[in-house]
Amino acid sequence: MAGKAQPPRIGVLALQGDVREHETILRELGADVVRVRRPEELESVQGLVIPGGESSVIDKLSRIFGLREPLRAAIRDGLPIYGTCAGLIMLADTVLDAIEGQESFGGIDIAVRRNAFGRQSESFETELDVPALGKPPVRATFIRAPIVERVGRNAQVLATLVDGRIVAVEQGNLLGTSFHPEMNGETRFHQRFLAKVNSRTVR
Ligand code: GLN
C-alpha cells in the first residue's frame, strides 16, 4: 500500500558513473534506495536517477544488461527520472556530437551537445539562479558537461548560465541538469524529483 509513511523506493542506474553521491542524497531525503542494473530492479522502483559519467558507456552497458528497452518503456509510462550530466544526455531526444552508433533513451524534447565547453572550461563551478527552486542560487559543478542547444515545445527551461546557455530542463516527470548538484550537497533538484515520485504514487 502506498501510505504516506512508506518511503519511496528509488533506483540509481548503476551501470557507470557517480552512483554513490546520488545514493547519499536520496537516503538523506528519506528514500529507500536501490541500485538498478537489471530489468527486475527497474521494475521495483518508483523513480530513477541516471548519474553523470560517460553517456556512450551508459548507452552501451544498458544494451548489454538488457535495460535499454525496459527503460524506454518506463519513460513512456511516465516513470519519474532525474538525469545529471551524462544522465541528461541519456534523456535527450537528440544527441549532438555523439560517438558513432551512440543513442540516448530519449524522453525530453531537446537536443544536447556533448562536451560543449571548450578544453579550458571543461570543468568549473558556478552559482546558478534557478527560479523554480527559489533562493539561494544553486552551486553547480560542470564536468565535461553538455549544453542544451534546442528546446522543443514540450520541454521547459529551468536554468540558464548568465550567457543564456541552457543547463536545466524539465518535461513532465523527467528532469535533467547539465551539471552535478550532488557534488555540492545541493538537494533541491532531488527534492523536486521526489515530489514527482510522490504525486505519481498517490494518484
Ligand atoms: N562528457 C560526458 C558524456 O558525454 C558527460 C560528463 C559527465 O557526466 N560529467 O557523457
Image (cartoon, rainbow, N blue to C red):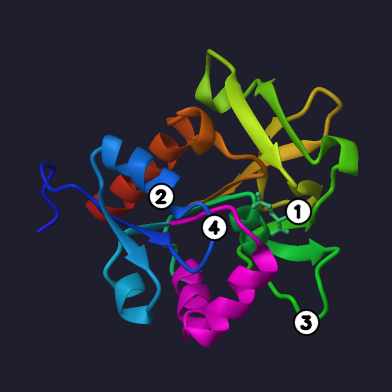
Residue 52 lies, in percent from the top left, at 58, 52
Q: Secondary structure at mark 1?
A: loop
Q: Quadrant of the C terminus?
A: bottom left
Mark 3 or mark 4: name the one nearer the start of the chain: 4
In percent of the image, x 36 and y 71: which residue is there?
42
Q: Which residue is mark 4?
A: 17
In percent of the image, x 74 and y 55: which residue is there?
110
Q: Counting other residues with Cα less than 10 Å from the Cα at mark 2, is it few (<14), some (14-19), or many (20 or more)?
A: some
> Most extreme residue toward the front, as rendered?
120
Asked if marks 2 and 4 touch (Cβ < 8 Å), the reply is no
Apparent side of residue 75 relative to residue 165 in the rendered image (left or right): left
Q: Is mark 2 within 8 Å of ligand 1?
A: no
Mark 3 or mark 2: name the one nearer the start of the chain: 2
Apparent side of residue 36 relative to residue 165 in the rendered image (left or right): left
Q: Amino acid at mark 2?
A: Arg
Quarter where residue 201 is shown = bottom left
**Principal SS element in the magenta part?**
helix
Q: Which residue is mark 1?
A: 152
**142 or 162, which lies in front?**
142
Specify whether residue 203 is in view.
Answer: no
User: Gap in Å between the C-alphas at discs 1 and 4?
Assistant: 28 Å
Q: Which residues are magenta?
A: 49-76
